């Protein structure tokens, strides 16, 4: 395995980092969704990195996609905006790219891959989170249409979305093959979106509830054959659990740099605090967690690109990155002390932004179940 970027990727990374530094200098941490920032990130190609160029993307593989998002997150502290963009790409654009017909790609893929159209992945429900097959939202066939009824919760991008990639049960007697996937404009009659309560972290990434009340959707809006929803969702989750977490990898690197600068300049008892073993040990452990996370993530992406089994490696990388990010946030608080307790301090924002990482896209507990199955313990 060689994770070294090729000349094109090295040039792309350098270009993205320059852009991201300028972006961070001109965009203060917003309280809400930053549509101007979204458009600028999308103009850099970040909304469609792995999508083929003839559909509005860049055509990168998984490893190159990870390296691109990591480069941007090293400079941009607004993890909410980056999270919204990554959720749009990996949970919505990928299913249309991988499962859409030529006609569906012609209608939906390019505006989604270029970021002109914002998408939301409507799958989670009040009683259906980790157990996705417990969903109750139904899609009943009626001639050439489906009629959808049900409610989705905690849907990233829902309040600002132009289109949903939504999952519903088309066969109540089946589990894996009983779910289908649909592309649904948010202006469709019978579809209502309401904002959820304010989040503690990732505050610039909006989320909401989606209600279907006899919402009529044409058969032509179904991605793949009936019952293929679980397969499409699984494929998108491989991309999301792998590639989305590269934003946390870049953010951890940024926080470590902040902590190193602070440890070298902050003095207590007439010496820099970095000279204290209690502080230096935390910084070394930060570096260890980042390097371990990067190796696991890059290996998972490399295996996917080589068309090799990678589910266990993706799960391991997701566990390592999400739990390392939280620990790095806690260590950074100890290094900065009371200063980090102010609401607008970057360490405070980072810690709040990384806390959900252990829950979304499959909790750490669910990832350990995946690994346990791979180890033939289940």
Image (tube, rainbow, N blue to C red):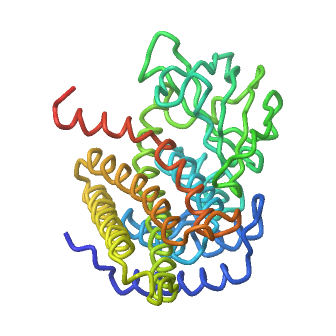
Spot the residue most to the top: 173
Q: Is residue 362 above or below residue 167?
A: below
> Which quarter of the rendered picture does the N terminus lie within?
bottom left
Foreground residue among 79 and 53: 79
Query: Residue 375: image x %, image y %?
Result: 17, 37
Q: Is residue 171 above or below residue 49?
A: above
> Which quarter of the rendered picture does the C terminus lie within?
top left
Foreground residue among 117 and 348: 348
307 relative position to 60: left or right = left
Residue in view at x 44 percent, y 81 percent: 273
Foreground residue among 345 and 43: 345
Foreground residue among 253 and 84: 253
148 relative position to 266: left or right = right
Query: Residue 374: image x %, image y %?
Result: 21, 37
Spot the residue most to the left: 376
Q: Is residue 239 above or below residue 185?
A: below
Instruction: Classify residue 65 by image quadrant.
Output: bottom left
Instruction: Classify residue 136 by image quadrant.
Output: top right
99 relative position to 376: left or right = right
Query: Residue 79: image x %, image y %?
Result: 60, 63
Residue in view at x 33 percent, y 62 percent: 293
Residue in view at x 49 percent, y 65 percent: 334
Q: How many marks?
A: 0
Residue in view at x 66 percent, y 32 percent: 153
Query: Residue 146: image x %, image y %?
Result: 67, 22
């Amino acid at each position: 395995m060689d994770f070294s970027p090729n000349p094109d990727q090295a040039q792309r990374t350098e270009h993205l980092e320059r852009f991201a530094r300028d972006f961070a200098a001109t965009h203060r941490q917003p309280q809400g969704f930053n549509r101007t920032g979204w458009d600028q990130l999308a103009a850099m190609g970040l909304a469609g990195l792995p999508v083929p160029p003839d559909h509005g993307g860049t055509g990168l593989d998984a490893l190159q996609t990870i390296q691109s998002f990591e480069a941007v997150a090293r400079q941009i502290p607004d993890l909410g905006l980056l999270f919204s963009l990554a959720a749009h790409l990996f949970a919505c654009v990928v299913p249309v790219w991988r499962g859409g017909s030529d006609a569906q790609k012609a209608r939906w893929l390019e505006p989604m891959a270029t970021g002109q159209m914002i998408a939301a992945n409507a799958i989670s429900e009040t009683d259906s989170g980790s157990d996705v097959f417990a969903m109750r939202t139904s899609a009943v066939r009626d001639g050439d249409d489906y009629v959808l009824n049900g409610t989705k919760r905690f849907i990233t991008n829902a309040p600002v979305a132009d289109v949903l990639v939504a999952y519903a049960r088309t066969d109540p007697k089946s589990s894996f093959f009983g779910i289908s996937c649909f592309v649904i404009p948010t202006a469709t009659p019978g579809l209502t979106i309401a904002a959820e309560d304010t989040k503690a972290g990732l505050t610039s990434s909006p989320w909401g509830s989606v209600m279907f009340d006899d919402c009529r959707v044409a058969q032509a809006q179904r991605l793949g054959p009936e019952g293929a929803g679980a397969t499409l969702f699984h494929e998108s989750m491989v991309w999301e659990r792998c590639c989305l977490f590269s934003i946390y990898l870049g953010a951890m690197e940024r926080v470590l740099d902040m902590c190193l600068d602070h440890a070298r300049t902050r003095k207590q008892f007439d010496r820099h605090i970095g000279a204290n073993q209690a502080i230096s040990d935390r910084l070394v452990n930060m570096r260890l967690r980042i390097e371990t996370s990067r190796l696991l993530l890059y290996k998972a992406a490399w295996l996917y690109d080589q068309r090799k089994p990678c589910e266990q490696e993706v799960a391991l990388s997701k566990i390592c990155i999400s739990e390392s990010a939280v620990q790095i946030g806690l260590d950074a608080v100890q290094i900065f002390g009371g200063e980090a307790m102010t609401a607008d301090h970057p360490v405070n924002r980072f810690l709040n932004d990384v806390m959900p990482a252990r829950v979304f896209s499959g909790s750490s507990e669910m990832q350990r179940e995946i690994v346990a199955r791979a180890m033939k313990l289940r």
